[in-house]
Image: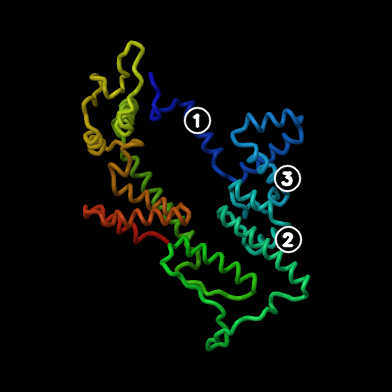
Amino acid sequence: MFMTPTQPLSTTGREYAKEIKEAWQEALDSILEVCRILVEAKDTLEAADYNTLINVHLPFSRRTAERLIRIGVDKRLTAKKHRKVLPPHWGSLYELTQLDDDSFDESVDKGEIFADMERKDVTSLVQLKKEEREDNNKSRSSGRSSASMTHTVAESDATGRQRVASVYSDKEMANWQLVELEKALQAVCDKHHVKAEIAKSTSDHRADREARKQLAAEVDVWLEKRKKSYNKGIDENELSLLRDVLYQHENEKAFLNTNEDGSFDDNDIRNPDNPYFGWSKGEIYNYCREHDILTQYSNFESIDFEAFIESLVLAHCKGNPKQREQVHRTLVRRSKSPKKRNAKLAQKALARLIV
């Protein structure tokens, strides 16, 4: 029998899948353990044996292996005292290896290195520290400090503070772009010991993150409860059959392989003995909807719009700024649906988002 991508896994297969998924999670301890093992292998194996290992037998490229080793030999990253502030992504950790010791320690003390920072944040930090170091070197060589630089005429407010700059945009900026701008402005202000007043809509991101975590937990519970109401009274064989049938319809009738005698596979939609023989795709989806059957094809989006909207709220809570912006656009589009119930669900979801 031809095994389609929707074929249910055996018990052993599910155990492997669980192990692989857990290992694939970019958990900091797992990444550092891989780095440690690579360093040990490089120190232990003969050169030819080591080259064969990283060129042939590893699930990543030689370049990646070399970068992981760079992480593994960096005592700052392997130190237990820094574990809580390091991002659990090997790419971000590699970028941090480019900081000199003083810049690294300073960034840790200032909270500029934190667990949920993205790689682009690390890249910006490394570039900023590099520029600061170059500026300091120039200042020392010229005998002048950056604080002695002259400025153009600045306005003063009622308190005597001088406004030395204003920032304008010719077009409306997405929230994730405002967040990135705030980070860049704050870095420049910290460098020159001046204060920036950031628009309230982009401030206090830590509180926003906590609020998103709380909302995500609530939606997670709701979705798990909703999932339990599906696939009752249907055995695994029928569920597998439905997945195969929908797979063929969704992939322009990517039929299953025929048997050696030329007969059709049991689950092939061309087989007259298939109980769904002759059914249209729409009829099958209606059947799944009416009987509360959830598969990777008859998913929330196609059979349960309310749950689909909730899954978008969850994706917004757990996504990065760009992903949240994408979810927001999807909900805005859905809020204009001609189906009043669907539009109302999307509108309510938009009101719950923490942007």
Tag 1 secondary structure: helix
Q: Residue at x 33, y 47 (%)?
A: 308
Q: Of marks 1 and 3, which one's residue comes earlier in the chain? A: 1
Q: Of marks 3 and 2, which one's residue comes earlier in the chain? A: 3
Q: Which residue is mark 1?
A: 15
Query: Camera-side residue: 23 or 154?
Result: 154
Q: Of marks 2 and 1, which one's residue comes earlier in the chain? A: 1
Q: Name the kind of residue labelled 1 in the image.
A: Glu
Tag 3 secondary structure: loop
Q: Are marks 3 and 2 in contact (CB under 8 Å)?
A: no
Q: Name the kind of residue labelled 3 in the image.
A: Val
Q: Name the kind of residue labelled 2 in the image.
A: Asp
Instruction: Identify whether 265 is placed above or below 35.
Output: above
Q: Residue at x 28, y 56 (%)?
A: 335
Left or right of 326 in this view: 281: left
Q: Position of residue 205 (x, y in %)?
A: 50, 63
Q: Disc 3 and disc 2: Cα gap in Å? A: 18 Å
Q: Which residue is mark 2?
A: 102
Q: Position of residue 33 (x, y in %)?
A: 65, 40
Q: Are marks 2 and 1 in contact (CB under 8 Å)?
A: no
Q: Which residue is mark 3?
A: 73
Query: Camera-side residue: 307 or 331?
Result: 331
